[in-house]
Image (spheres, helix red, strand yellow):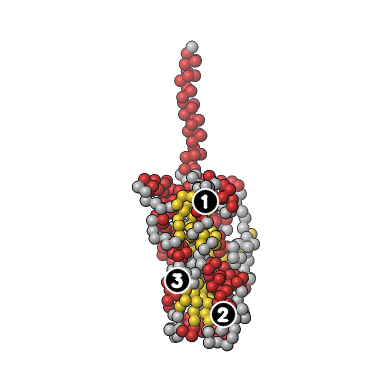
Amino acid sequence: MWIVSVIVTCLLSSVGLSAVVELTEANFESEFANGDWLLEFYAPWCGHCKALAPIFDELSLKPTGSVKIGAFNAAKGKNISAKYDVTKFPTIVYRKDGNLGVYDGARTLEGLAAFVDRMNDPPYIFTDDLARLSHTFDTTENVTFLFAFNPNAEPSGAETSLQTFMEVARKLQNHASFAVYDTSKAVSTHSADHMAVVESVSYLGFSLAKMERGKAPVFMADTDLLTYEEIGGFVEHNNYPTLNKFDNHNFKRLSHLNKTMVIAIVDYQYGGIADWLVSGLEAAIASFPVETTSTCVFGHLDGVRWRRFIKEHDAIMGSILVVDTKHDLHHSFPIDPHAAPTAVKVLISEVITTVIDGSIELYPTVPPSLLQKIQYRIRDYAPWSYIILALPIVLALLSTMVSLPKEEKIKKH
């Protein structure tokens, strides 16, 4: 696949179809220090970097507002790579209003373009209608953090907390979406979300909630005054949808939240069966109050692409895998492929219940041996790995065949 990407890159470069700013060790500090950037640290020999190059080229040709799209050859600037803690390739970093961060979203044109759009947007929006939040849900995480307040309420910490919320939004706008809601100016006063938010505001005059399309708001516990650390912590631990599609761009971050992961292992090539299991998981989640599942992260992943992961965790296709990443424990629950949707919901609900009440029995995850790691690598890079392994044998046979006539000639003399 990356060979095709290299060909595409060459074709784009040959006709000048790229606006990526190539930084060098000589101009890096002076250029990168100015303005907003989305920058790729790459190495010439890196296959994933070659695959990403045409995506960056195409992204650079789109309207990117104040954000410059750049690339830096880390192999020629190891000191700069070390300064920005770059240890693997490609690494994508961004600079926004002087704040630095590492991009960990999808490495697709759509994902990167959405991230650039977010960098150009204001850090938060003011709204008088919760229905208008729908467009803010169209982000990589599909959630928005809402600060609601009533300026007519009794004196409280609303104003100070609002200023703190805005500060957090400016710092984290590239990772999450933020909105401010004045309940006294609300235009849609009959929606379930509005009623829930108004009720949450009635006690202290303000509240902070995670909003998700089609889901009930998740409120932060009441406190007289919201601090930067409290708001930032709430965002970090809730910046994901109820049901995630796990991939390389989000699995690592979510696994580091120290929450129990409940994962449906599916094969997306068989859409009907995959939908059957994912729908069962979603229905099971909906049967629990939101506050009871706050210690879990739910999602589904491609069992074909993640075959090494599911093998290490004794899971199979069409199963529910429970993983405690903090203690490296797991338990897999195969689901009968012939079970009716209602039965699937019941079975998964039973698993979730044991996770919530702590009665689930988890087993240690055994890391792969060196031989298994080698086998995984050979399969991952097939057929090229097989060609490389066979090459010494082929060369040895060829050398033998070439030397045979010489030996026969010596015998005749």
Q: Secondary structure at mark 2?
A: helix
Q: Secondary structure at mark 1?
A: helix
In the image, residue 89 above or below residue 254: above
In the image, residue 77 above or below residue 287: above
The residue positioned 59% from the left and 81% from the top of the image is: 157
Contact between marks 2 and 1 (CB within 8 A): the answer is no
> Counting other residues with Cα less than 10 Å from the Cα at mark 2, is it few (<14), some (14-19), or many (20 or more)?
some
Residue 334 picture location, percent across and down: 53, 63
Q: Amino acid at mark 3?
A: Thr
- Look at mark 2 in the image and give the residue it sits on: 159
Q: Amino acid at mark 1?
A: Phe
Q: Which is nearer the N-term, disc 3 or disc 1? A: 1
Tell me where residue 167 sits by quadrant: bottom right
- Look at mark 3 in the image and give the residue it sits on: 136
Q: Which mark is residue 38?
A: none
Residue 194 picture location, percent across and down: 48, 82
Q: Which is nearer the N-term, disc 2 or disc 1? A: 1
> Counting other residues with Cα less than 10 Å from the Cα at mark 3, is it few (<14), some (14-19), or many (20 or more)?
many
Residue 155 picture location, percent across and down: 59, 86
Q: Is residue 69 visible?
A: yes
| 3D distance between C-alphas at marks 3 and 1 | 34 Å
Residue that extends furthest to the left in the rendered view of this protein: 15
- Look at mark 1 in the image and give the residue it sits on: 28
> Counting other residues with Cα less than 10 Å from the Cα at mark 1, is it few (<14), some (14-19), or many (20 or more)?
some
Q: For this rendering, which residue is in front, 30 or 369?
A: 30
Q: Between tags 3 and 2, which lies in front? A: 2
Residue 107 picture location, percent across and down: 46, 57
Q: Which is nearer the N-term, disc 3 or disc 2? A: 3
The residue positioned 47% from the left and 76% from the top of the image is: 126
Q: Amino acid at mark 2?
A: Glu
| 3D distance between C-alphas at marks 2 and 1 | 41 Å
